[in-house]
DNA sequence: TGAATGACTCGAT
DNA sequence: GATCGAGCCATTC
């Protein structure tokens, strides 16, 4: 396994695991927080290997900018992702989060001190 | 080493 | 307002 590169993913996993209960974030938000604002795809790539990471990363809380569960197909069970989101009080319809704007959580909020 | 892919995002038409 | 194309970074073949 690589070392430095692992850190890159580790940062992503750390952020995803920091997502509060009942909240979701977007790939671009995480990518922007890491500095790779244009590397939103890398976040998705990291999620792909996150399945081997322990503890498992709540990737179900990570959706695209539209609030669409684009990654549900990559989950163990497509219904699993939507189910988990609904379990947290997130309204999902047609593989898309309805109150996405309401449950959206930005990793930058960690630095942002109200 | 070069080219292609990917759980995305933004800008232009 | 909706649709199409290009860009970006890292990994893999």
Image: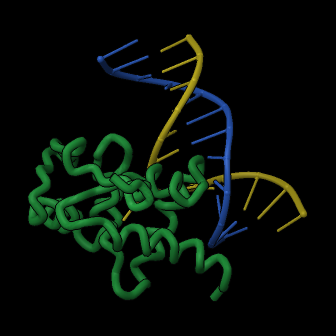
Chain colours: A green, B yellow, C blue
**Residue drawn at point x = 13 percent, y = 45 percent:** A93
Horizontal side of residue C2 vs C7, given as left or right: left
**Residue drawn at point x = 51 percent, y = 64 percent:** A45
Position above or below: A113 against C11: above
Horizontal side of residue A34 vs A47, given as left or right: right
In the foreground, A109 or A88: A109
- Percent x, y of residue A15: 42, 68
Q: How many marks on residues? A: 0
Horizontal side of residue A41 vs A53, given as left or right: right
- Percent x, y of residue A52: 43, 84
Instruction: Determine the residue located farthest toward the front in the rendered image.
Output: A114
Position above or below: A78 against A27: below
- Percent x, y of residue B8: 45, 48
Position above or below: A76 against A34: below
Position above or below: A17 against C1: below
Q: Quadrant of the N terminus of chain A?
A: bottom right
Q: Quadrant of residue A3?
A: bottom right
- Percent x, y of residue A8: 59, 72
**Residue drawn at point x = 33 percent, y = 52 percent:** A114
**Residue drawn at point x = 29 percent, y = 60 percent:** A72
In the foreground, A38 or A45: A38
In the foreground, A112 or C4: A112
């Amino acid at each position: 396994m690589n070392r430095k590169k692992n850190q890159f993913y580790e940062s992503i996993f750390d952020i995803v695991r920091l997502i509060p209960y009942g909240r979701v974030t977007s790939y671009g938000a995480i990518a922007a927080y890491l500095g790779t604002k244009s590397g939103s795809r890398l976040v998705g790539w990291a999620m792909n290997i996150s399945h081997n990471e322990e503890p498992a990363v709540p990737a179900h809380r990570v959706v695209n900018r539209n609030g669409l569960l684009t990654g549900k197909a990559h989950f163990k069970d497509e219904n699993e992702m939507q189910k988990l989101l609904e379990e947290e009080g997130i309204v999902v319809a047609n593989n898309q989060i309805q109150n996405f704007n309401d449950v959206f959580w930005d990793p930058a909020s960690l630095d942002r001190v109200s």
